[in-house]
Amino acid sequence: MTVSEQLAAPADGQSNAARLANPGMGAVSHGIVRVVAVLAAVSDGTPCGVTVSSLTPVSFQPPMMLVALQQSSRMLDILAYGVGFGLSILAADQQDIARHFARRLRPVGADQFAGIGYRIGPLAGAPLLRDAIGWLECRTIDIADTGDHALVIGEVLDESRNGATTFDPLLHGPDGYRRLLRSRPNARQ
């Protein structure tokens, strides 16, 4: 057996797929720190949103984003119609908003946004959270089923950054929420 074959073969005989499905395994793939955003759209005139932490650019020409949503997400039914959606990249101090839109038992419809400032983006027609550090307006291009998640590909129609805030995004990793910037006790003034 070659070194490559030895490295590829699990020592315990368990397949890689079975190993990753085991909650105690897959520490590397689940240990990646990700930026947190709220994906929002409008369905029958009603705004809806969901927290996402698996998003990445997949093309620069034309600009496109990929977002992973659980197969059970109500948002998939809305995006399947090819509607526009907004991505509000959350600031490090917006953990409460991330938790709110991540809760399964949150209010439905417009009540989801009660007390949360937002505006409707002019191009995608989707809610964009006011205090986010940046926004992307997208149009759904494709949705691909991939196991327990679906991959939503959106063409970026516009992007903007909140000039009133420092670029300090909310991150999510295996130990929960965290921030990118840290204050340093001996930092020069």
Image (tube, helix red, strand yellow):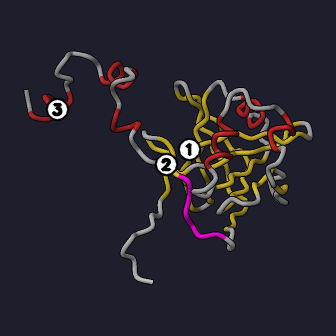
Residue 125 is left or right of residue 161, and the answer is: right
Q: Any magenta on residue 166?
A: yes
Alpha carbon of mark 2 to alpha carbon of mark 1: how far?
6 Å
Which amino acid lies under the numbered mark 1 shown in the image of this protein? Ser
Q: Which of marks 1 and 3 is in front?
A: 1
Alpha carbon of mark 1 to alpha carbon of mark 3: how far?
31 Å
Kindly give the residue lying farthest to the top in the view shown: 13
Q: Magenta segment, which residues?
A: 165-170
Tell me residue 113's x, y (percent): 81, 44
Which amino acid lies under the numbered mark 3 shown in the image of this protein? Leu
Q: Do the residues labelled 2 and 3 touch (CB within 8 Å)?
A: no
Q: Mark 1 points at which residue?
A: 53
Q: Name the residue under label 3.
A: 7
Q: Quadrant of the C terminus?
A: bottom left
Alpha carbon of mark 2 to alpha carbon of mark 3: how far?
28 Å
Which amino acid lies under the numbered mark 2 shown in the image of this protein? Arg
Q: Are marks 2 and 1 in contact (CB under 8 Å)?
A: yes
- Secondary structure of the residue carrying tag 2 is strand
Q: Any magenta on residue 136?
A: no
Instruction: Count neighbours of disc 2 (C-alpha within 10 A) and say few if under 14, some if 14 to 19, many if 20 or more.
Output: some
Closest to the observer, 106 or 57: 106
Picture layout, residue 16 above or below residue 100: above
Q: Name the residue under label 2.
A: 34
For marks 2 and 1, the one nearer the N-term is 2
Residue at the spot 64% in from the left edge and 40% down from the top edge: 99
- Secondary structure of the residue carrying tag 3 is helix
Residue 44 is left or right of residue 30, and the answer is: right
For marks 1 and 3, the one nearer the N-term is 3
Kindly give the residue lying farthest to the left in the view shown: 1
Tell me residue 169's x, y (percent): 56, 58
Residue at the spot 87% in from the left edge and 39% down from the top edge: 110
